[in-house]
């Protein structure tokens, strides 16, 4: 009796466009979920098995060095940054070379930190020593942290030691690995600098102003 009025073409086009947008949005979220899996708590990059972090006060001009010996007798330090499966990521020399000029602006990095990473582990005893290479007066608090990273992050050691002046060498920690187990954590003194006497030091000490303690450029 009554003829059905045809739907306007623009309404059909709008419906198709809306449905297409919904399909594209759905496909986007599915793709995003596939390439970005939810991170599992406690899991870390397996490229490093253990990490030693040594930190002293920001902005301090003191130069602190980290020495680590593995069960095979390898010692990693500033003059041998790779030894066995250990690697010294950066030799931090206090404020020396921590200031750069970029586009006419002075950029300063106040962080004092050295990190040693282990690409693999061997059974036996490891020793971590801290050396006050250059002091500028007074005791220096140095934080030492040892973490076993796999299969999950485990804190092996964390403490603060007080270095007393230029040349002071202290054993922060000694520990023994037995498979996945960490044993015999102690700080019985052991001289590691003496083990490196045959490696001629190549790190020159920066010249310091006796009055201000600042580097003479």
Image (cartoon, grey):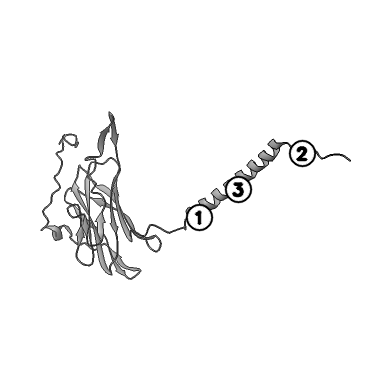
Please tell me which residue is depicted at 21% across the width and 67% down the height of the picture: 72
Helix, strand or loop at disc 1? Answer: helix
Q: Which residue is mark 1?
A: 34
The residues tagged by marks 3 and 1 sit, at their Cα atoms, a distance apart of: 17 Å
> In terms of depth relative to the viewer, which is nearer, 77 or 157?
77
Q: Visible in this render: residue 16?
A: yes
Residue 36 appears in view: no
- Does label 1 or label 2 sit earlier along the sequence? 2
Residue drawn where x is 54% and y is 48% of the image: 28
Looking at the rendered structure, the secondary structure element under dot 2 is loop
- Give residue 6's mark: 2
**Residue annotated with mark 3:** 23
Residue 114 place in picture, x, y as percent = 27, 50
Q: Spot the residue most to the right.
A: 1
What's the distance in space between the residues labelled 2 and 3, CA to CA? 27 Å
Q: Residue at x 18, y 59 (%)?
A: 192
Question: Is disc 3 placed on a helix, strand or loop?
Answer: helix
x and y, in percent, of residue 174 in the image: 26, 63
Mark 1 or 2: the one toward you: 2
Residue 45 appears left or right of 117 = right
Give 93 or 104, whichever is nearer the viewer: 104
How packed is label 2: few (under 14 Cα within 10 Å), some, or many (20 or more)?
few
Q: Earlier in the sequence, mark 3 or mark 1?
A: 3
Which is nearer the N-term, disc 2 or disc 3? 2
Q: Which mark is residue 108?
A: none
Of the two numbered discs 2 and 3 in the rendering, the one whose residue sits closer to the viewer = 2
Q: Which quadrant of the figure has residue 204?
A: top left
- 2 and 3 marks in contact (CB < 8 Å): no
* Label pair 1/2, CB-CB below 8 angstroms: no
Q: Residue furthest top?
A: 104
Residue 15 to residue 129: above or below: above
């Amino acid at each position: 009796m009554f003829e059905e009025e045809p739907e306007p073409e623009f309404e059909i086009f709008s419906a198709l466009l809306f449905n297409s947008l919904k399909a594209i949005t759905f496909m986007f979220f599915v793709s995003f979920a596939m390439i970005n899996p939810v991170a599992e708590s406690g899991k870390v990059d397996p490229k490093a098995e253990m990490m030693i972090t040594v930190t002293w006060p920001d902005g301090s001009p003191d130069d602190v060095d980290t020495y680590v010996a593995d069960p095979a007798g390898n010692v990693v330090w500033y003059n041998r940054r790779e030894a066995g499966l250990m690697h010294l990521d950066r030799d931090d020399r206090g404020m020396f070379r921590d200031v750069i000029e970029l586009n006419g602006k002075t950029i300063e990095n106040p962080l004092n930190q050295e990190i040693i990473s282990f690409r693999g582990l061997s059974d036996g005893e490891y020793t971590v020593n801290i050396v006050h290479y250059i002091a500028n007066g007074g005791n220096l608090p140095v934080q030492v942290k040892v973490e076993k990273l796999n299969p999950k992050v485990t804190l092996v050691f964390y403490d603060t030691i007080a270095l007393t002046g230029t040349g002071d060498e202290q054993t922060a920690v000694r520990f023994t690995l037995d498979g996945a187990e960490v044993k015999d954590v102690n700080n019985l003194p052991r001289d590691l600098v003496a083990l490196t006497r045959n490696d001629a030091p190549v790190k020159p000490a920066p010249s310091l102003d006796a009055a201000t303690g600042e580097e003479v450029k």
